[in-house]
Amino acid sequence: MKFLDTGTIELLVNGEKRSALVRPSDLLLDVLRDQLGLTGAKPSCKNGDCGACTVLVDGWPVKSCLMLAVEAIGHEIITIEGLQNAPLQQAFVDEFAFQCGYCTSGFIINCHALARIHPKADEAVIREWLQSNLCRCTGYEEISKAIHSVLSTHKS
Amino acid sequence: METLHAIGKDIPKKESWNKVTGAARYNTDFNEPGVLHAWLVTSLYGHALIKSIDKTLTLKFPGVLAVVTGDSMPRLIGPILEDRPPLAIDRVRYFGEPIAIVVADSLSKAKEAAGKVYVEYEPLPVVDSLKDALEKKYILHEDLPLYRRIKPDEIFPQPGTNIANQIKIRKGDMDRGWAESDVIIESTITLPQSLHAAMEPRNARAEIKPDGKVIINTSSQGPFDVKKELSYYFNLEESKITVNVPLVGGGFGGKTTPQLEILALLASQSVNGRPVKLIESREQDFTTSPGHLGLEAYIKLGANRDGMLKAIEITCQVDTGAYTDSGTKMTRAMAADCTGPYNIENVHCDAFCIYTNHTYVTAFRSFGRLSHTFAIERAMDKLAFSLGIDSLELRIKNAVNPGHFTPTNVKLNSSNLGNLPECLKRLKQMINWDEGIRIELANGKVRAKGLSGLWKTSSSPPNATGAAIITFNRDGTVNLNVGAVEIGMGIKTALAQILAEKLQMDINKINVVMEVNTETSPRHWKTVASMTGYMVGNAVLDAAEDVIKQLCKTASVVLRCPPEVLQVGGEKVFLKADPTIFVEQRAIACGYKYPDGSSTGGEVIGRGNFIMHHLLPMDPDTGRGKLGPAWAVGAQAVEVELDTKDYTYKILKAATVLDAGKVLNPKNAKGVTMGGMCMGLGYGCREASLFDSGGVRMNPQFRTYHLMRYGENPEYLVDFIETPQLDSPYGMRGIGEHGIIGMPAALANALSAAAQVNLDFTPLTPEAIWKAKRGVSL
Ligand code: FES
Ligand code: FES
């Protein structure tokens, strides 16, 4: 078997076909940031512990530090840059749901997926989903208000 | 004219939309082709001699350009005491200490090649605790007396020991104090080191241009400090250094003293000035960069039968880790506020800053008060119990008030202090204190409440400055340029609010320069100590006055009247007596053009500045002196539900009342306060840097170092009272740090009441409570 040092792959990101030169071990997070210039997803632990790097893969939130770029071939990737005027972005602004903003892309992507997949999510589901992300600045209350405001518009 | 108000309004942060769309740029978000990457080789031992460093294999590794070691900068550095080599020389004193920098053309190569640097160590005995340090298990800095003291008036090392500094407070007459005391309690507390854990790991990029100009891009709270220190350490003119800071992904004090900037510059020097990026991994951020101090404190507190405090004796032992950095300054800061927000006339305090083989420490939100408050507030609860007095009443009775003197003998008034009794009274209602502090529920559960008072002043140099520059666009909108960094607290927006209120303008027409560039932004000391609103806010007001003067001068020509009869507001300059006679701001801000085409006036450029005044260093023998211009006081409470079978508990509610002077932005102030509370509860219930007996960090990841997560937070109750600080913009007080201060103490007081055992430590894990209950030592 031949070991490929680098190769060109094509990724479907935010509705656009993008090509990137990657090594097999390159993380999706690094390729998005360094090659495609999509720096909204943030590195913070690169260990799956904090969620700052969350993106959508086929509509599901995935920590892009836990996925290889080559694994993303053939899947539909949405990063925070792919969200335009999503209700959650407005809700985060209205509720002051961030301070430094470093965790925000990851939280919004995760909340966005939650609101789509479980529009009637109860507290336990919200908690289970959002516990995968860390925020060191806020006390989480504003984030809670933001997700609830979007879920309640779904409910009504 | 109708008055416009920007102060007291819930104005979203100026950069909000950039932050919710991923467009906001932090320092590692700037891609550039050709930039080199650095990776650190760090110590695997808590304490060891470095016998040799073999870089042969690394240098042969493809893509590697250089390996930098301690010999490239054979000097010691430090903001107060120069005791730390930027890269270890012959010896490491903590796990994670940087030993070498590998520079390569890609990050993955730098990382892989770093694994091939072979360091031969000879382990030394590890000073794993304050006890080890004081018993002189090993003297960590034999050359302590030779170290250069940068601030000789605040650092008093004790040669031949591990004591880097001792601060003394001597006030009143202790003999009299004890004689007047009917009840005396003694209390000892133990708090571990912990971490800042900002979500953005620390990082820096350096480059040296062919003309010798050094460019630093960094995630820092103190860009001007970086410039000053680099100039000093590298012997460069300040004009040869530019420091750029974009948005910062959280700081909490941990991004203040230069560390990685120095290493990045060394790396760039090793490759002929090519740009080099140095980004710490989460594990390095947690072990190589500095953390938050540990504390052991002993308190003896006396009161008369009525509960009036008469005397206090305090010994603080600060675990500063391997080097002092800001540890000595925090030691001094806690000594200066050592009584907590209570009036005690007879005070004896010795605060020691002590070396161990733990991670070295730097400024952390509250600058030491978080830890010290824990000591005081546990003692207050014990005293209340001994006296049989309600603990909230005891605090109100002894609260510092105008007319009292601080431990360092500063006379207090309502402007420089605020109103603590009012905070306590408000808190009392908020948390329904009168229902009782311990209520037994069904199934062996207990609901209990605990309290804490708090106060804090700042510790800036007596000549710290802030400054502001205001320029205009041709449409009359305004640009505000300041040297304060946006670390998440919304400071840029707060300053825009101050300016909008003063110029009576729509805040949306004020643009704030978000990034700081030390070449073009006016100097500000650093974005720390909750002091930026006060210092830079005052400078903004000064600059606004300057603008108003200039606008009125040009308008007086246009409107043919003396400038004194004019007023600025609503983007117009108008006659005070008749606002229908006016000229538009935009018509004069960049020079006025007469109908015939000739012009007058010119660009309006406002400049404003502020310098601290009337601060005095502390006297080495008595502590007399004044560290900061004012205090902010507050009161906090926590309500828990404890299961008395297994000692698990839920934090039901956390409450804070702060005297904010004037709340500039209520929603933001509440958010920043809740963030501090959450961080304080995390420290109280579970955060701790864990070391094994060899000084190796056991929990260098989020997976093992647990921050509070979504839904683990309690219900927050936050309120503010407003006693204006007269020399501060619109009366505001700095409160950015204060939410954290009393939380661990209030939690410990609540749990002590619930479990009916003295809990004098953190982290308050169920196991630790169980052990305390069983009388098993920890
Ligand atoms: S960076 Fe991916 S989970 Fe933390
Ligand atoms: S806003 Fe800073 S980490 Fe969440």
Image: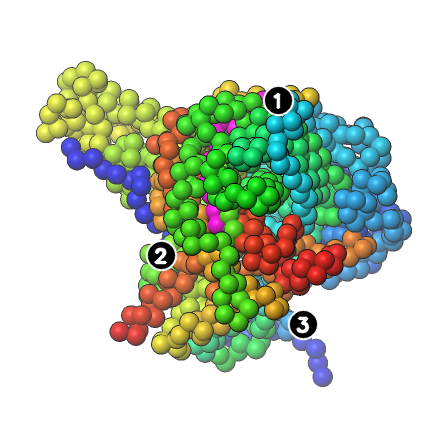
For discs 1 and 2, the disc positioned in front in the rendered view: 1
The image's mark for residue A95 is 2
Quadrant housing residue B378: top right
Task: Specify the amino acid type for callout 2.
Answer: Glu
Q: Is mark 2 on a helix, strand or loop?
A: loop
Residue B713 visible in image:
no
The residue lying toward the viewer, choosing from B622 and A111, is: B622
Question: B547 left or right of B222?
Answer: left
Mark 3 touching mark 1, by CB under 8 A?
A: no
Residue at image location 51% in from the left, 57% down from the top:
B438
Residue B289 position, x and y percent, is 66, 48
Judge from the rendering whether residue B58 lies leftward or rightward of residue A107; answer left or right: right
The correct choice, above or below, for A85 with respect to B268 in the image is: below
Highlighted magenta segment, given as a residue range: B624-637
Q: Are marks 2 and 3 on the same chain?
A: yes
Q: Position of residue B327 (x, y in %)?
A: 67, 38
Q: Name the residue under label 3.
A: A5
Subunit that carries the residue with mark 1: B
Viewer-closest of B358 and A109: B358
Between marks 2 and 3 in the image, the one whose residue lies nearer the viewer: 2
Label of residue B172 in the image: 1
- Residue B396, given in percent of the width and then of the height, sits at 46, 37
For the question of whether residue B772 can be seen, the reply is yes
Q: Is B612 included in the stretch rendered in magenta?
A: no
Q: Is mark 1 on a helix, strand or loop?
A: loop
Labels 1 & 2 near each other (Cβ < 8 A): no
Q: Which residue is drawn at 16% across and 17% down?
A: B561
**Chain that bears disc 2:** A
Give the structural element (helix, strand or loop) at label 3.
loop
